[in-house]
Image (cartoon, helix red, strand yellow):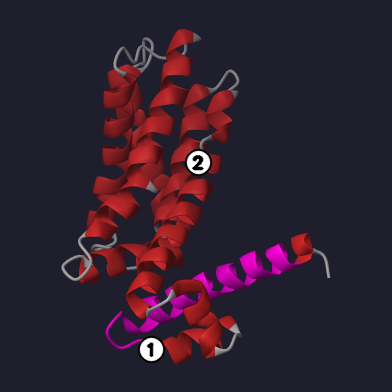
Amino acid sequence: MSSSTVSRGRIDKRQAILEGAFTVFARQGYAQSCVQEIADEAGVAKPTVYNHLTDKATLFKHAMEATARTVLNDRLAALDPLGNPGADLRSTLEEVAHALLRLHTDGRSCALRRLLHSEITRFPEILDIVLESGPDRLNRALADRLARLTLAGHLRATDPDLAAEQLMALLIGPLEVRSQLGTRQMDDTELRDVAQATVRTFLRAWGLDEPNTP
């Protein structure tokens, strides 16, 4: 067996452990989870978990970081249409806003936020881990897209960082209220309503000659 095959197998096994760990932590919380359950979920032997990630606390922090990174990558991909918005910027922004809302309300994202809130006292460092792999980088990427749209003459976002911050606030604020902090499932029609209202307000602030339509 080649060294590259061994290395690939080790990476795959580590990934399976991290995914299994997050599943168990999300289902039961940190205190009620045990390494044997994580091993069973990942389909590996218990010693294999320890070989890769030493103890439960280390496993939790790495599982949170890996999940936050995956969530971030999905959200960064959702911004892609802004690279070539075409003639209808409003529709493109609504498409992106709707995609971000769907990702924010999926099971993995909700579980990540629940674990962050419930375990931040035990693991204060996970706030920085999740923020750096999540909202901070997403806002920077969104600001970059908005700056490019401004340079191309599609927006008048003289402060792209502020524009990105406001766009995300317009999305997430109503979402948290309507979903009762993630405890109520919102259907796709509701998500589209929030996306459309967000874009309408955003373009009134940052759009070019946006008509004052309801």
Magenta stretch, main secondary structure class: helix
* The N terminus, quarter of image: bottom right
> Which numbered mark, 2 or 1, is in the foreground of this view?
1
| Disc assigned to residue 76 | 2
Q: Does 15 appear above or below 38?
A: above
How many residues crowd mark 2 within 10 Å: few (<14), some (14–19), many (20+)? some
Q: Which amino acid does label 1 sit on?
A: Cys
In the visual, does 84 lie left or right of 211? right
Dot 1: element: loop
**Residue occupying image coordinates x 82% and y 65%:** 2
Q: What residue type is labelled 2?
A: Leu
How many residues crowd mark 1 within 10 Å: few (<14), some (14–19), many (20+)? some
Q: Does 146 appear above or below 29?
A: above
The quadrant holding residue 115 is bottom left
The residue lying toward the viewer, choosing from 37 and 158, is 37
Residue farthest to the right?
Answer: 1
The tag earlier along the polypeptide, 2 or 1, is 1
Q: Position of residue 11 (x, y in %)?
A: 63, 65
| Disc assigned to residue 34 | 1
Question: Cα distance, mark 2 to mark 1?
Answer: 33 Å
**Residue occupying image coordinates x 46% and y 91%:** 36
**Residue occupying image coordinates x 20% and y 61%:** 124
The residue lying toward the viewer, choosing from 133 and 80, is 133
Q: Where is residue 74 in the image (x, y as percent from the top left)?
A: 52, 49
What's drawn in magenta, residue-wise? 6-34
Q: Where is residue 90 in the image (x, y as percent from the top left)?
A: 47, 26
**Residue occupying image coordinates x 36% and y 10%:** 209
- Can residue 67 be seen here? yes
Dot 2: element: helix
